[in-house]
Amino acid sequence: MSFLIVGSRKLLAFDIDGTILDSNKRPLPSTLEALDALRKAGHFVTLATGRSRFLAESVIRELQFENYILCNGAAGFFNHQQVFKETLDQKALTTLIEVCQARGIDTAIVQLDQSKRLSSFDLEKMQDAMTSFGSTASELGGFSHDDEVYQALAYYEKDCDPLFEGQHPAFNFVRWHEKCVDVIPANGSKARTLLALAERLGIDRADIIGFGDGLNDREMLRESGIGVAMGNASLLVQQEADLVTKDHNHDGIWHALKELHLID
């Protein structure tokens, strides 16, 4: 497939883990060069990640992002100012936590700048999931109804999916690790917030280019004008994309932007 990219300003959204960071959790030199070229050309760039602000902070700072979509779309920032917020329904979340605890399933709540695990049934399982992207299991804490919860984590394997999918209509359950899912608002997604940001900026949907590799990127790739899947993405994710580039260890972002004629 060939792409004809016209000269209008683009909105480019980049997932973090497995996309803008390599397997060593570092941005490639080619990625840094590409981001600089996009900005100099006047394009609008944003992160679009499942991470919360405190987990994305180092990437935001090092890669000089002023705009970022966090918590799988539950929070959106423009020029470091929050312009979009959708927190989890407190009553439905309380019910979900009770169901998980009754089954011995660990949960954690995620706020913008902190997270708290609510149980300790299987700390090793939690550690395994969280260290997969360079983090660690949260400190044990309580859940207050004053907490603004942007997403939750539930630590269970795929064979437990039927116990939750379709059983809690206030939520979507998005798997990002073999032992953990993100719990997000039923209508929330990276794609929804990205489209809202584009509307705010006066950028047509056709001029949105989304990059990702995970299951939580599928809708963003599908709804963008051009969806770019990294070569390390699963076939299920690649099927949603218009373009599949090289993987996150082999200059995938750079090669895609070259093919799209957005960098020289």
Image (cartoon, rainbow, N blue to C red):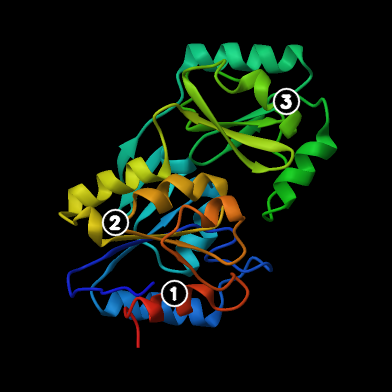
Identify the amino acid type marked 3. Answer: Cys
Looking at the image, is 220 positioned above or below residue 255? above
Q: How many marks?
A: 3
Mark 1 vs mark 2: which is more N-terminal?
Answer: 2
Q: CA distance from mark 1 to mark 3?
A: 37 Å
Secondary structure category for the residue under label 1: helix
Q: Eyeballing the image, is 80 above or below 95?
A: below
Residues at marks 1 and 2 touching, judged by CB atoms closer than 8 Å = no
> Are dots 3 and 2 in contact, CB under 8 Å?
no
Dot 2 amino acid type: Asn
Q: Residue at x 39, y 63 (%)?
A: 65
Secondary structure at numbered mark 2: loop
Q: Which of the labelled discs sits on residue 160, or is there none?
A: 3
Res. 49 visible in picture:
yes
Front: mark 3 or 2: 3
Residue hosting label 1: 256
Q: Residue at x 42, y 28 (%)?
A: 87
| Residue 155 left/right relative to 109 | right
Q: Which one is in front, 243 or 213?
A: 243
Q: Counting other residues with Cα less than 10 Å from the Cα at mark 3, is it few (<14), some (14-19), or many (20 or more)?
A: few
Q: CA distance from mark 1 to mark 2?
A: 26 Å
* Quadrant of the rendering where the N terminus is positioned: bottom left
Residue at horizontal 47 percent and vertical 79 percent from the top: 255
Determine which residue is flagged by label 2: 79
Residue 222 against residue 31 in the figure, above or below: above
Whichever of callouts 1 and 3 sits on the residue coming sooner in the sequence is 3
Disc 1 + disc 3, Cβ < 8 Å: no
Q: Could you tell me which residue is drawn at 34 percent across and 82 percent down?
A: 263
Q: Nearer the viewer, mark 1 or mark 2?
A: 1
Q: Amino acid at mark 1?
A: Ala
Residue 167 picture location, percent across and down: 57, 15
